Image (cartoon, rainbow, N blue to C red):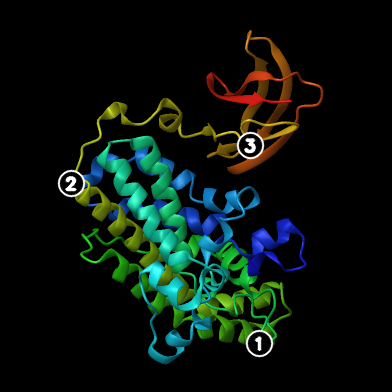
């Protein structure tokens, strides 16, 4: 797919294409909680904390799932009908029928990924699977956030067609991180959406209008200071701060509206105090599913840490309860951390990875195969 073909190191590319960066995505998901109306306020704080702490999981999956990247963008101005009428068909099959699946996937499938995740969230609410519903809501928030970031809605997503390469990460990650304390906005009470597909596509069309605004702000900032300087970022924020705050506020509102709508359409189920696993109640550390599983030579562990300077230890135990290896013993900062473990000469079988922090521990089972 197109956005995976650039000759940049994988890590740099991942950072460049991460909508709003981890700071912005977390703020969007976190502020969503303030928008939830009283009928669904029981989701706070246990459930909404999980939504906040997993706001960037969809980005981390890009390194593991080759199908993930296209879910984060849509180069909507590559569609001739959008240039003519300002819209495209909402039904995925209709768009594929007109343009072919290769073209559609190459342009990105952000709106349809958003709608599919909404459907998954509603299904979780229906069967009252509160743990999975929180994780789907976190992904939904990520895709909604990407849909409110203009450079995720255009073919000129990194300014490569206007001589502004690198603007993507300068704007959404570095600038937002620098001025996050100034990104403050009031909450609006969530409303039920009558036409979910229309709602998602309409905010994409609205946010697309800010593509030129971001690029103009970048061009202006370059006249004030060299790229990367304090003067540059101060100028970039001065020209783009107001509409950036507006888009992030709209993203939090949209996420709350979609969550509330999914809950209502699922029959308005109630979550009782034991609805979220102990891991999620703790809210300080978490251990995500092991990948790949089963594995042959190496395993990827992902640890979520919600507080700075958290002591963690990750160890491997065999099926008899014997410790076989200590993968990690460190003090970690807030965020999701990926740790790759080489199984070496470990024999095939069932193993347990155990993450400890203070008196709290959580484990995941995985299998090594020949």
Is mark 1 in CB contact (under 8 Å) with mark 2?
A: no
* Residue at image location 69% in from the left, 26% down from the top: 369
**Residue annotated with mark 2:** 39
Quadrant of the image containing the N terminus: bottom right
Q: Is 246 or 149 nearer to us in this picture?
A: 149
User: Which comes sooner in the sequence, label 1 or label 2?
Assistant: 2
Mark 1 surroundings within 10 Å by alpha-carbon count, few (fewer than 14), some (14 through 19), many (20 or more): few
Residue 53 relative to residue 117: left or right: right
* Residue at image location 36% in from the left, 69% down from the top: 91
Quadrant of the image containing the C terminus: top right
Residue 340 relative to residue 81: left or right: right
Mark 3 surroundings within 10 Å by alpha-carbon count, few (fewer than 14), some (14 through 19), many (20 or more): some
**Residue annotated with mark 1:** 162
Is residue 119 placed above or below 245 in the rendered structure?
Answer: above
The image quadrant of residue 107 is bottom right
Q: Residue furthest bottom?
A: 84
Label 3 secondary element: loop
**Residue annotated with mark 3:** 292
């Amino acid at each position: 797919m197109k956005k995976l073909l650039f000759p940049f190191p994988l890590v740099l590319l991942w950072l460049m294409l991460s909508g709003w960066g981890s700071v912005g995505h977390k703020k969007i998901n976190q502020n969503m909680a303030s928008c939830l109306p009283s009928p669904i306020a029981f989701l706070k704080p246990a459930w909404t904390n999980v939504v906040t702490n997993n706001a960037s999981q969809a980005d981390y999956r890009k390194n593991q799932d080759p199908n993930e990247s296209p879910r984060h963008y849509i180069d909507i101005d590559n569609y001739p009908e959008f240039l003519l009428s300002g819209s495209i068909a909402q039904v995925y099959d209709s768009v594929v029928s007109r343009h072919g699946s290769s073209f559609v996937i190459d342009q990105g499938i952000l709106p349809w990924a958003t709608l599919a995740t909404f459907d998954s969230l509603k299904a979780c609410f229906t069967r009252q699977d509160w743990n999975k519903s929180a994780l789907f809501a976190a992904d939904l928030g990520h895709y909604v956030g990407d849909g409110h970031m203009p450079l995720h809605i255009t073919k000129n997503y990194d300014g490569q067609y206007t001589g502004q390469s690198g603007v993507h990460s300068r704007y959404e990650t570095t600038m937002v991180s620098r001025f996050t304390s100034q990104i403050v906005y009031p909450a609006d009470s969530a409303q039920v959406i009558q036409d979910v597909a229309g709602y998602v596509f309409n905010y994409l069309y609205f946010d697309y209008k800010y593509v030129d605004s971001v690029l103009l702000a970048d061009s202006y900032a370059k006249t004030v200071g060299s790229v990367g300087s304090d003067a540059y970022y101060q100028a970039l924020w001065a020209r783009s701060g107001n509409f950036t705050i507006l888009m992030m506020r709209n993203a939090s509102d949209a996420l709350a509206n979609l969550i509330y709508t999914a809950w209502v359409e699922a029959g308005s189920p109630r979550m009782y105090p034991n609805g979220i696993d102990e891991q999620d109640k703790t809210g300080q550390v978490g251990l995500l599913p092991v990948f790949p599983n089963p594995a042959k030579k190496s395993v990827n562990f992902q640890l979520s840490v919600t507080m700075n300077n958290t002591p963690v230890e990750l160890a491997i135990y065999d099926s008899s309860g014997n410790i076989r290896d200590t993968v990690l013993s460190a003090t970690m900062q807030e965020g999701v951390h990926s740790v790759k473990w080489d199984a070496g000469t470990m024999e095939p079988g069932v193993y347990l990875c155990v993450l400890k922090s203070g008196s709290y521990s959580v484990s995941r089972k995985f299998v090594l195969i020949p």
